[in-house]
């Protein structure tokens, strides 16, 4: 799909369009991306907007690539979600599940009423993964519209593994996230703190295949898991490009929306 490597510019930002710019006749074939971020601590070296900043960047880049082949729109990013496990750290905010579900139900129902049939809830926060799977299950049956969800670093896991040096994939305030913020907003990164912060190399693992909820302090006193000292802006550029490319390939490849029409 060579067009993804040489995209034709197209308007993709929902919030920037005038009413007459929305193409009702193509609504059913338009991919609508709903980016979902978070506001939560990211250690001593990154701001609390990291998840929202990064998922927005991935969504916008993927949409620009995909729009060369299919109409694609990106909604404004939801900047708060399920971050209860970070609430012991200052600056963190959270929703409860019922509120998140109610918000997304209203958004998806609004899109459905206007004829949209290809809706992707693009996740940028690890604490949302299980919940968004359930949201997709509930809304697909309730509204009879095919809703999908994806977490960008899971979609791009193979590519991320080939770029990162100190961890297999994105963790938290880590080599991956720090690199991407260094690329997008270097002014927001305390590089000295990133080099000196004490952080476990891994975390968030199951115990013998059994899940149990634990707050972030269980995994890391600093709020960081991974290797931020290995971050570079060059890695950040490569990670963002990889996530956007892989996601765009999925969105226009047809398999996700095979039964959407």
Image (cartoon, helix red, strand yellow):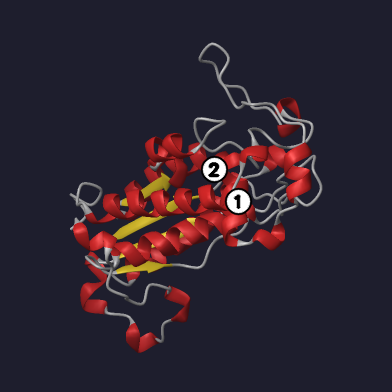
x, y (%) of residue 172? 63, 39
Asked whether 193 or 206 is in front, the reply is 193
In the displayed structure, 196 sits above or below 54; it is above
Q: Residue at x 32, y 80 (%)?
A: 22
Check disc 2 and report its element: helix, strand or loop. helix
Asked whether 3 or 232 is in front, the reply is 232
Give the labeled residue for mark 1.
81
Q: How many labels were placed on the picture?
A: 2
Q: Are marks 1 and 2 in contact (CB under 8 Å)?
A: yes
- Side (left or right) of 159 relative to 176: left
Quarter of the image with the C terminus in it: bottom left
Asked whether 210 or 66 is in front, the reply is 66
Quarter of the image with the N terminus in it: bottom left
Q: Residue at x 39, y 54 (%)?
A: 244
Q: Residue at x 80, y 39 (%)?
A: 88
Give the labeled residue for mark 2.
128
Q: Kindly identify which numbered label has been placed on residue 138.
A: none
């Amino acid at each position: 799909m060579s067009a993804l490597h040489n995209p034709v510019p197209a308007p993709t930002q929902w919030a920037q369009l005038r009413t007459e710019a929305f193409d009702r006749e193509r609504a059913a074939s338009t991919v609508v991306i709903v980016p979902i971020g978070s506001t939560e601590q990211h250690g001593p070296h990154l701001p609390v907007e990291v998840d929202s900043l990064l998922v927005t960047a991935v969504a916008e880049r993927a949409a620009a690539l995909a729009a060369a082949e299919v109409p694609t729109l990106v909604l404004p990013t939801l900047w708060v979600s399920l971050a209860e496990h970070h609430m012991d750290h200052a600056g963190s905010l959270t929703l409860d599940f019922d509120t998140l579900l109610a918000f997304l139900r209203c958004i998806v129902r609004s899109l459905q009423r206007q004829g949209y049939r290809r809706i992707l809830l693009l996740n940028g926060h690890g604490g949302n993964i299980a919940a968004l799977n359930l949201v997709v299950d509930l809304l697909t049956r309730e509204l009879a519209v095919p809703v999908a969800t994806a977490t960008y670093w899971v979609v791009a896991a193979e590519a991320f593994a080939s770029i990162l040096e100190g961890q297999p994939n994105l963790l938290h305030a880590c080599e991956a996230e720090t690199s991407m913020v260094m690329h997008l907003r270097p002014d927001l990164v305390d590089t000295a703190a990133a080099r000196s912060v004490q952080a476990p190399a891994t975390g968030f693992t199951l115990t013998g295949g059994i899940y149990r909820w634990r707050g972030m302090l269980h995994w890391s006193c600093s709020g960081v898991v991974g290797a931020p000292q290995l971050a570079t802006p060059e890695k950040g550029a490569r990670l963002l490009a990889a996530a956007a490319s892989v996601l765009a390939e999925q969105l226009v490849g047809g398999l996700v929306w095979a039964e959407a029409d």
